[in-house]
Image (tube, helix red, strand yellow):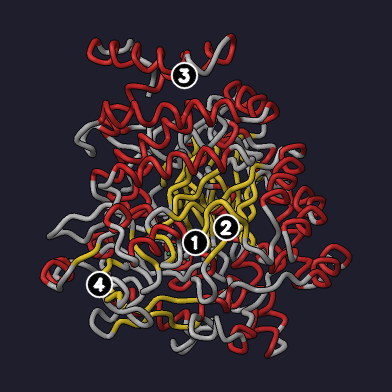
């Protein structure tokens, strides 16, 4: 993680590269560039070496890309680099709040976003992830995840100039822009694919193309299907070239061949180019899939991490303000590698989605039992201290029930039966369920059923409002606030998904949109309801008002609680009551214990746990009150959430 003296074998390589750099850089630019190159060369080299046969030759080709991008980096972005280098933990701090939105659904266009910056600032947003806005193929394009041109903006959203203007405005307010970097695949209409289809060998090597089914059939033996329903199989026959093409997702999303160093160079250049337009965070979409190996599920292969390490070093040399966020929705033991383990410890992505936390929150809300959640999270590997989890309750994707069979077994559950229960519960089939989720990608072969639906509809608000049942309205809002409290209080970068701050319900209008009707993930990708937003602010007693103000309060409390710095771990407490989830965050200022009642009944929890953590005068920072203790037991109201520190602390 820390700079070590340059190994002897890299010295002459560095010298050669520096001579190359001197041709185009001088003065303080040359000095800064040289220092960074020396600092990051080991990471770059050890990233490339296990993947590409001629790492040194590749570095010599990479250098002009780095130099050109460094020269082109605008002065205010260089200033941002300097600022971030002075505060490398900027994204780990408790004031960090991210907001995730579709540009068109939130504000129409990129220019429209500029009009909404006050709204975001009021929520405390410090990081804005706009869903794919680079130019996609004509619809359908998987919500923009089939990019046709990475150097152009989707026409109905604006232009590259608009993007640059927006990033400048965001920067002025201290908000970082996050852009999706789809690096597993491109649209079949992307120039590389067009030229591959036309038979150009150079571009055919950018993809995985096969003249017959022999190899595809071999690979298929161990490959899962991501979209078994609307895109079964992993290969598509391309009429134009007469070849089978690897298409993990939809047939028009062509997987790239990262074993080809040209692909690496293209993306290195692209990342720097976009960083120079003001993008600060790259969401590495479907990163788990970029390396293929026969006989495996072709996910999480070691080369994925080596390549990420090299790309990150590229970004650090030219644009150290840039962060990488891994989108790897994989099992915990695989996931931790995206933040770096072993030789890559702390050298790959700065943040990664904590998919397990999200799944476990919904699982415990359904079962009213936190034992599985506590067990699964207790066993979660420790992350490098210079990284942060992205914690979230909902996102634009469906929820897949990533419950490990052995975690389930350890708390006496069958993984398979529990996953079935969760699908039944959230699709509203389970008798007492108030949920209005939709089944996504039912896989008859594996029995897998994923779930779409907005947080509010999953938590029961849609049904409660329809039935005009104030108690159920109250309970569903409490469930949502409980979920958000875990997300905000776990430590990491909390991602608020647009509309969740108003408890927006499922939006069924996707059924009338021909390009979306078949993909029910659009049910939870609503249009922003600005009238509701205004009502929420004006009427704190309305459901949206309770949600908005409740969330805002949690955000404010979080901001003033240093214990939520992401460098620290949440250490899971043994569930002394099966309905109460708890953890401790140890901080030099004193410990913070968080307790969450996942049931609609009053619960009691042994107060000695607080005393053992040194909290003799336990104060709940959310209510600002001393924690209610009766007969040595903490009393937790239905769905209570407590962030407890010592009053003296
Ligand atoms: C990611 C996105 C998802 C998309 C897929 C293919 O998982 O979150 O929406 O379908 O990548 O790009």
Quarter of the figure with residue 138: bottom right
Q: Is residue 111 visible?
A: yes
The residue most toward the right is 538
Please say if the residues under marks 1 and 2 sit with CB atoms less than 8 Å apart. yes
Is 427 situated left or right of 88 in this image?
Answer: left
Of the image marks 3 and 1, the number of the one nearer the N terminus:
3
Q: CA distance from mark 3 to mark 2?
A: 30 Å
Q: CA distance from mark 3 to mark 4?
A: 51 Å
Quarter of the figure with residue 43: top left
Disc 1 target residue: 147
Q: Which dot, 3 or 4, sits closer to the camera?
A: 3
Is 357 situated left or right of 475 in this image?
Answer: left
Residue 134 badge: 2
Residue 414 badge: 4
Disc 3 target residue: 36
Of the image marks 1 and 4, the number of the one nearer the N terminus:
1
Q: Which dot, 3 or 2, sits closer to the camera?
A: 2
Residue 638's place in the image compared with 82, above or below, is below
Q: Which dot, 2 or 4, sits closer to the camera?
A: 2
Residue closer to the observer: 453 or 304: 304
* Secondary structure of the residue carrying numbered label 4: loop
Residue 581: horizontal and vertical position, in percent?
Answer: 47, 55
Q: CA distance from mark 1 to mark 2?
A: 7 Å
* Secondary structure of the residue carrying numbered label 1: strand
Of the image marks 2 and 4, the number of the one nearer the N terminus:
2
Of the image marks 3 and 2, the number of the one nearer the N terminus:
3
Please say if the residues under marks 1 and 4 sit with CB atoms less than 8 Å apart. no
Residue 119's place in the image compared with 225, above or below, is above
Please say if the residues under marks 3 and 1 sit with CB atoms less than 8 Å apart. no
**Residue in view at x 40 percent, y 76 percent:** 450
* Secondary structure of the residue carrying numbered label 2: strand
């Amino acid at each position: 993680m820390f700079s070590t003296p340059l190994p002897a074998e890299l010295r002459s390589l560095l010298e050669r590269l520096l001579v190359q750099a001197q041709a185009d850089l001088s003065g303080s630019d040359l000095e800064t560039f040289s220092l960074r190159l020396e600092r990051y060369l080991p990471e770059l080299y050890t990233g490339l070496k296990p993947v590409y046969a001629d790492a040194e030759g590749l570095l010599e080709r990479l250098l002009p890309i780095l130099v050109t991008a460094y020269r082109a980096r605008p002065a205010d972005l260089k200033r941002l680099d300097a600022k971030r280098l002075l505060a490398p933990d900027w994204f780990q701090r408790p004031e960090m709040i991210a907001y995730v939105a579709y540009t068109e659904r939130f504000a129409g266009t990129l220019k429209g976003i500029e009009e909404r910056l006050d709204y975001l600032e009021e929520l405390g947003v410090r990081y804005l992830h706009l869903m794919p806005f680079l130019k996609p193929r004509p619809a359908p394009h998987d919500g923009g995840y089939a990019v046709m041109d990475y150097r152009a903006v989707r026409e109905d959203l604006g232009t590259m100039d608009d993007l640059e203007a927006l990033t400048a405005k965001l920067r002025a307010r201290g908000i970082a822009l996050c852009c999706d970097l789809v690096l597993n695949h491109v649209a079949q209409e992307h120039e590389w694919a067009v030229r591959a289809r036309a038979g150009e060998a150079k571009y055919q090597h950018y993809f995985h193309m096969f003249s017959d089914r022999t190899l595809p059939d071999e690979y298929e033996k161990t490959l899962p299907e991501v979209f078994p329903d609307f895109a079964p199989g992993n290969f598509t026959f391309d009429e134009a070239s007469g070849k089978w093409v690897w298409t993990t997702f939809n047939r028009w999303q062509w997987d790239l061949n990262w074993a080809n160093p040209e692909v690496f160079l293209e993306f290195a250049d692209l990342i720097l180019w976009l960083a120079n337009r003001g993008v600060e965070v790259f969401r590495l979409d479907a990163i788990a899939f970029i390396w293929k190996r026969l006989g495996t599920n072709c996910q999480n292969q070691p080369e994925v991490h080596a390549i990420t390490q090299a790309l990150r070093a590229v970004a650090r040399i030219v644009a150290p303000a840039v962060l990488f966020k891994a989108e790897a929705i994989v099992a915990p033991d695989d996931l931790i590698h995206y933040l770096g383990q072993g030789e890559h410890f702390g050298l790959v992505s700065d943040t990664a989605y904590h998919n397990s936390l999200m799944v476990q929150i919904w699982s415990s809300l359904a079962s009213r039992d936190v034992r599985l959640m506590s067990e699964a999270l207790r066993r979660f590997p420790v992350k490098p201290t210079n990284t942060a989890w992205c914690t979230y309750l909902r996102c634009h994707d469906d929820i897949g029930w990533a419950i490990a069979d052995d975690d389930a077994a350890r708390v006496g559950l069958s993984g398979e039966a529990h996953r079935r229960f969760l699908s039944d519960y959230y699709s509203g089939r389970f008798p007492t369920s108030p949920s209005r989720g939709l089944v996504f990608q039912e896989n008859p072969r594996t029995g897998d059923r994923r779930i779409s639906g907005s947080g509010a509809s999953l938590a029961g608000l849609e049904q409660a409002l329809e039935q005009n049942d104030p108690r159920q309205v109250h309970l569903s809002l409490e469930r949502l606030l409980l979920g958000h409290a875990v997300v905000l209080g776990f430590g990491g970068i909390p991602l608020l998904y647009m509309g969740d701050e108003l408890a927006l319900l499922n939006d069924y209008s996707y059924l009338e949109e021909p390009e979306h009707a078949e993909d029910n993930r659009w049910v939870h990708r609503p249009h922003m309801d600005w009238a509701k937003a205004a009502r929420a602010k004006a009427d704190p007693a309305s459901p949206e008002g309770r949600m908005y103000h409740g969330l805002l309060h949690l955000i404010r409390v979080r901001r003033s609680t240093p214990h939520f710095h992401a460098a620290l771990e949440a250490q899971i407490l043994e569930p002394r009551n099966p309905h109460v989830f708890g953890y401790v965050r140890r901080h030099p200022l004193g410990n913070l214990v968080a307790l969450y009642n996942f049931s609609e009944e009053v619960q009691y929890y042994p107060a000695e746990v607080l005393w053992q953590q040194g909290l003799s005068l336990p104060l709940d920072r959310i209510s600002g009150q001393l924690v209610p203790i009766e007969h040595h037991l903490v009393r937790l109201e239905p769905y209570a959430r407590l962030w407890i520190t010592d009053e003296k602390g």
